[in-house]
Image (spheres, helix red, strand yellow):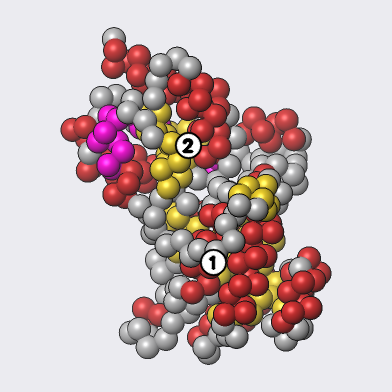
Amino acid sequence: MPAMTLYDAVGAALTEEMRRDRSVLVFGEGIATKRHDLVDEFGALRVRNTPLAEGIIAGTAVGAAGSGLRPVIDLLFAPFLCYAMDELVNSAGKLRYMSGGQFSFPLVTLAMTGAGWGVGAQHNHNVEAWFVHSPGLKVVMPSNPADAKGLLKAAIRDDNPVLFFIDIGLLHQPGEVGNDELVLPLGKASIVREGRDVTLVSYGKTVHHCQQAAEMLGSRGIAAEVIDLRSLKPLDEASILASVRKTGRLVVVHEANRLCGVGAEIAALVAEEAFAALKAPIVRLGGPDAPVAASYPLEQAFVPQPEAISAAAERLCHRQAA
């Protein structure tokens, strides 16, 4: 299988979907400048740079989607979505319902998020939970190039608006991607490591931190199961619950603010549906309730690291043993 970065995997998905469906078009902030190959193959009518005006970009995309096209827009950094909240949340997310299903809004919004480039608080802010909380929107955040390609293809084909978050720390990390045109279903998590003692649930770059933590735990005789959510909405509740019912322990990890984050929803789900299976309290590890520093070392300190994850999981296992 060939190696490909997550950035290139996104480009491959765009290329394949634009070849497959002439209604797919791409526009946004610097997209034509960054992806010359798309301009060369599909022309300036289907691949366009835009002004730095996120609300106008998103509003145009909503209109295009309602008119039978399948736009993919690039708004660069996730905090810039603040300028497009009305268009994405109040229009894209609601208009299909308000039309009684007469119209669909197949729209994908790309945005980079998370630590890795030291770009400062106004460019680094994990806001995915905002959109999980917004009716009518789907939310995706892959952890590797193969998933990025397969999930983006599925998102483009979906008749609902999808927020596609790209973890900036993973953008240029290589990974194996198959030559086939695999489409991964939205709402299906991946069990990236099987275990019997504790479940680690995560998405984005902290999936890899969980895998490293699982290696540490394995050296101490603790078998951790690692789940990569891939899709935050729809959420694969069945996979989470099945794992926790097997292991009896749960640690949820994400870079976003711990307060009211996706981890809180998962903790509530397990408490409601699998409480009897729990052998220890649920633990959530997340970022602090503070803006992110521009300093690279401080930025990394913001993110739950493998050592903290393994320590939390080990405490749960020892708590049961005691």
Residue 322 location (% of width, % of height):
29, 10
Residue 214 location (% of width, % of height):
47, 27
The residue indicated by pointer 1 is 181
Residue 78 occupies quadrant = bottom right
Q: Residue at x 35, y 83 (%)?
A: 101
The tag earlier along the polypeptide, 1 or 2, is: 1
Q: Is residue 240 above or below residue 72?
A: above
Checking the image for residue 104, the label placed there is none
Horizontally, is 278 left or right of 253 in the view?
Answer: left
Residue in front for this viewpoint, 298 or 154: 154
Q: Is residue 116 above or below residue 297?
A: below
Checking the image for residue 253, the label placed there is 2
165 part of magenta stretch: no
Q: Label 1, secondary structure: give it.
A: loop
Q: Amino acid at mark 2?
A: Val
Q: Residue at x 36, y 46 (%)?
A: 265
Horizontally, is 144 left or right of 201 in the view?
Answer: right
The residue stretch that appears in magenta: 241-258
Residue 249 location (% of width, % of height):
32, 29
Q: Amino acid at mark 1?
A: Glu
Residue in front for this viewpoint, 43 or 122: 43
